[in-house]
Image: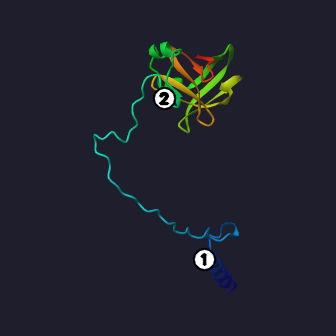
Amino acid sequence: MRTIHTVAGLALVLALAGCQRTSMSDFGGNPAPAPLQAQPVPSVSSGQLAAPGDTSQFPAAPVSGTAAVGGVTTPGATDTAAAANALDVTKESMVGNWRVSNAGASCDMFLTLTNLGSGSRGGTRGCAGELTAMGSWEVAGKQVVLKDRNGNPLARLFKTADARFDGSTNGGQSVSLSR
């Protein structure tokens, strides 16, 4: 009889063990997080789009020698030859390390495709003068514009050979990039 009570007791313990709570909602003793509150949705505005041929919403095309491209004035008399003979440049071809020659000194520049403001992230190491503030760059036509950390133009360069760019800083110093 004792065996029957032992087996019955063991069966009862196993049955109750199967009913033990195993939910993870009490994980670590913390209650479940409160549900998120609904947020207001801003109103949607509507209006008429311009007619397909209407160009009044666009600024006038730049006039050579006086307008700004990428925030830098288009080439003046000193850079006219470089601009006229400049080779095509793509943003992807600019990515990587460059050796910089600036006003007789040399330093390093690294250009990436990571967005930063209106351009892409870039920087210099060991440079002096205006290029120490370089933080971004962009391609505008056949021109490469180097910008400071606030997006203000520092210099403009034109592709003069397969792995060479020449130009000047806003202060008039010559700048060359090469690989």
- The quarter in which the C terminus is drawn is top right
Assign a secondary structure to mark 1.
loop
* Residue kind at label 1, given as amino acid type: Cys
Q: Residues within 10 Å of mark 2 (few under 14, many from 20)?
A: some
Closer to us: 18 or 175 = 175
The answer to which quarter of the image holds residue 24 is bottom right
Q: Is residue 49 left or right of residue 42?
A: left
Q: Position of residue 122 (x, y in %)?
A: 60, 30
The answer to which quarter of the image holds residue 64 is top left
Q: Position of residue 116 (x, y in %)?
A: 57, 38
Hey, which residue is sitting farthest front in the picture? Answer: 66
Question: As displayed, is residue 105 above or below residue 56?
Answer: above
Res. 114 mark: none
Closer to us: 47 or 35 = 47
Q: Colour scheme of this structure image?
A: rainbow
Q: Position of residue 148 (x, y in %)?
A: 62, 32
Residue bearing the label numbered 1: 19
Could you tell me if residue 114 is visible in this image?
yes
Question: As displayed, is residue 158 above or below residue 44?
Answer: above
Q: Residues within 10 Å of mark 1 (few under 14, many from 20)?
A: few
Please tell me which residue is depicted at 65% across the width and 17% down the height of the picture: 102
Closer to us: 86 or 9 = 86
Assign a secondary structure to mark 2.
strand
* Residue kind at label 2, given as amino acid type: Val
Mark 1 in CB contact with mark 2 (< 8 angstroms): no
Residue at mark 1 to residue at mark 2: CA–CA distance:
74 Å
Residue bearing the label numbered 2: 69
Question: As displayed, is residue 62 above or below residue 28?
Answer: above
